[in-house]
Amino acid sequence: MSGARSLRARTNERSSHCCLTRSLTVIGHSSRQLGGIVYAYHQHCYEAHERIKQREREAESERLRRQSRAQRQKRRAGVLEALIAYSRRAAGLELDM
């Protein structure tokens, strides 16, 4: 058992990941059941946060899509109103002649 611990400690020391903050036991590389449970809990939390972020990104893009669609409709309505007003003026001038 102490051989496995010393091997794990040496593996941690030689690890190229300098940002590794949890021991290999905690992140699930263990024969003990607790490591897997803790790892599964952290993985679940991470995935839940990722799903929340994804939903927020999708909601933001949908909001932007709706805004641009509304602006396009307003522009079209403005152009159409101007065209109708121009046509009415032109028709009124033709009637006066």
Image (cartoon, helix red, strand yellow):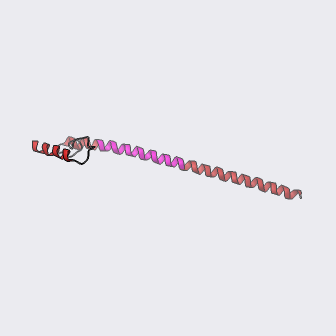
Classified by dominant secondary structure, the portion drawn in magenta counts as helix
Work out whether residue 1 can be spotted.
no
**Front-most of 20 and 63?**
20
Residue at point 65%, 49% (across, down): 74
Residue 45 position in % (x across, y down): 33, 42
Report if residue 52 lies within the magenta region.
yes
The span shown in magenta is 42-64
Q: Is residue 13 left or right of residue 54?
A: left
Residue 56 position in % (x across, y down): 45, 44
Report if residue 85 lies within the magenta region.
no
**Front-most of 10 and 65?**
10
Residue 62 position in % (x across, y down): 51, 49
Residue at point 68%, 51% (across, down): 77
Residue at point 37%, 43% (across, down): 49
Instruction: For the C terminus, give its image quadrant.
Output: bottom right
Quadrant position of residue 91: bottom right
Instruction: For the N terminus, give its image quadrant.
Output: top left
